[in-house]
Amino acid sequence: MIPRDVDMTEPARIRIDGACLCGHVRYEALIDPARVGICHCRDCQISSATAFRVGAPVPVDDFKLLSGSLRVYVKTAESGSRRALSFCPECGTSIHGSAVENATTLSLRIGTARQFAQLVPQQQIWCRSALPWLGDLIDTPRYLLQTRESRIPDSP
Ligand SMILES: [Zn+2]
Ligand SMILES: [Zn+2]
């Protein structure tokens, strides 16, 4: 049973902050951790140059650029909508994506957030293009660092 004093209409939002790889861009944002998700779309794989992107929606008013500036690339997504993809002009780190005009929400690329490890994804979209080997990674040899000596004992 839900206690009466818990307001279920207001998401429990938390303040996060992050920076790009070179430190030119720094930001803070208010996000709802229940809406953190993974996107497996091909555009996210390419622009992040990795297996998938982790993001969270942020109302534009809840995102604040603390330093630096953003460069924008407009891409027509697989869904047909045009997306403004913002990144650091110095190091290329992705910061957020949004609608091109009258954006009310940003999709924040939370891999840049200091709190990233605590922001557990709650859903996955565009699984149609998800990499088929993602679920098999547990069966690969794993190392704490980069050297052979750091092999994790219970890894294959
Ligand atoms: Zn940068
Ligand atoms: Zn995507």
Image: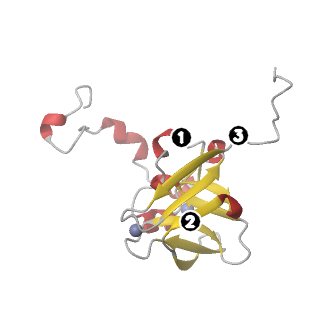
Q: Residue at x 59, y 72 (%)?
A: 77
Q: Residue furthest front?
A: 66
Which secondary structure, mark 2? Answer: strand
Residue type at numbered disc 3: Ala
Instruction: Point out residue 103 in the picture as x, y percentages from the top left corner.
Output: 71, 71
Residue type at numbered disc 1: Val
Cα separation, mark 1 vs mark 2, equals: 24 Å
Q: Are marks 1 and 2 in contact (CB under 8 Å)?
A: no
Answer whether residue 130 is visible to the viewer in this image.
no
Mark 1 burial class by Cα count in 10 Å: few <14, some 14-19, many 20+:
some
Q: Any mark on residue 120, and which?
A: 1
Q: Which residue is nearer to you in this view: 76 or 16? A: 16
Q: Earlier in the sequence, mark 3 or mark 1?
A: 3
Q: Residue at x 59, y 70 (%)?
A: 78
Instruction: Point out residue 16 in the picture as x, y percentages from the top left corner.
Output: 56, 49
> Would you name the residue on which mark 2 appears?
65
Cα separation, mark 3 vs mark 1, equals: 15 Å
**Measured along the vertical axis of the image, is residue 49 above or below residue 12?**
below
Residue type at numbered disc 2: Leu
